[in-house]
Amino acid sequence: MGKPNAKGYMDKQPFGKNFHLGEDWNAVGRNDYGDPVYAVSHGIVKFVGDEGPGWGTVIMITHLLPNGKRINSLYAHLSKINVSKGDQIRKGKMIGRIGDANGRYGPHLHFEMRDDFFFRPDLVIVEILLVISIQKYSFVRIEN
């Protein structure tokens, strides 16, 4: 989206607003359905699939940090996917296209960076309550 550096896009719902755990990126005028989505960094595709009405079609990429730790980028609400699980990708590769979670939302890219992710929508409320009460996330670990 907006290569390079999200040019022409804006974060319409930032992290933390209304317990939102990511950022929602829209093109000016909200006419971005089908626009390309690019990988934020080199990595390996760890997950590709439909995660139901909340996230819709999702790509998760694991990136290796200079200190040896890993971090994951998540791209949700996609209309098209151009990668497969296990693919090694480079920063800037077009990995998919912006969608609307099968009509649930206006077109936008939901983007997150975390050290772990869970893919169980029924746990979202539990996660939000944990954030409020102890300011710490609780995730089901996805093993490499």
Image (tube, rainbow, N blue to C red):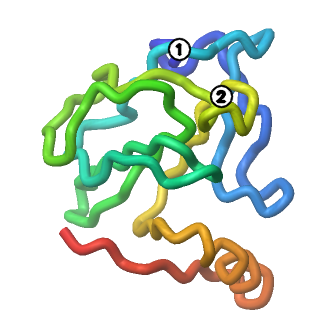
User: Residue lying furthest bottom in this view?
Assistant: 134
On residue 144, which mark appears?
Answer: none
Quarter holding the C terminus is bottom left
Q: Is residue 104 left or right of residue 61?
A: right
Q: Is residue 98 left or right of residue 81?
A: right
In contact (CB < 8 Å): disc 2 and disc 1? no
Three-letter amino acid code at the position of disc 1: Gly
Q: Is residue 119 left or right of residue 11?
A: left
**Who comes first in sequence, dot 2 or dot 1?**
1
Image height of 13 relative to 10, above or below: below
What residue do we see at 55% from left, 53% from top? 52
Q: Is residue 46 left or right of residue 114?
A: left
What residue do we see at 66% from left, 43% from top? 23
Disc 1 crowd, CA 10 A, few/some/many (<14, 14-19, 20+): some
Nearer to us in this view, 83 or 89? 83
The quadrant in which residue 18 appears is bottom right
Q: How many marks?
A: 2
Q: Which residue is mark 2?
A: 108
Q: Percent x, y for residue 86?
A: 14, 47
Dot 2: element = loop
Disc 2 crowd, CA 10 A, few/some/many (<14, 14-19, 20+): many
User: Residue lying furthest right in this view?
Assistant: 18
Dot 1: element = loop
On residue 34, which mark appears?
Answer: 1
Q: Percent x, y for residue 81?
A: 35, 29
Image height of 103 relative to 29, above or below: below
**Between marks 2 and 1, how big is the CA–CA gap?**
9 Å
Q: Percent x, y for residue 61?
A: 31, 47
What residue do we see at 24% from left, 37% from top? 42
Q: Percent x, y for residue 60?
A: 36, 49
Image height of 87 relative to 115, above or below: above
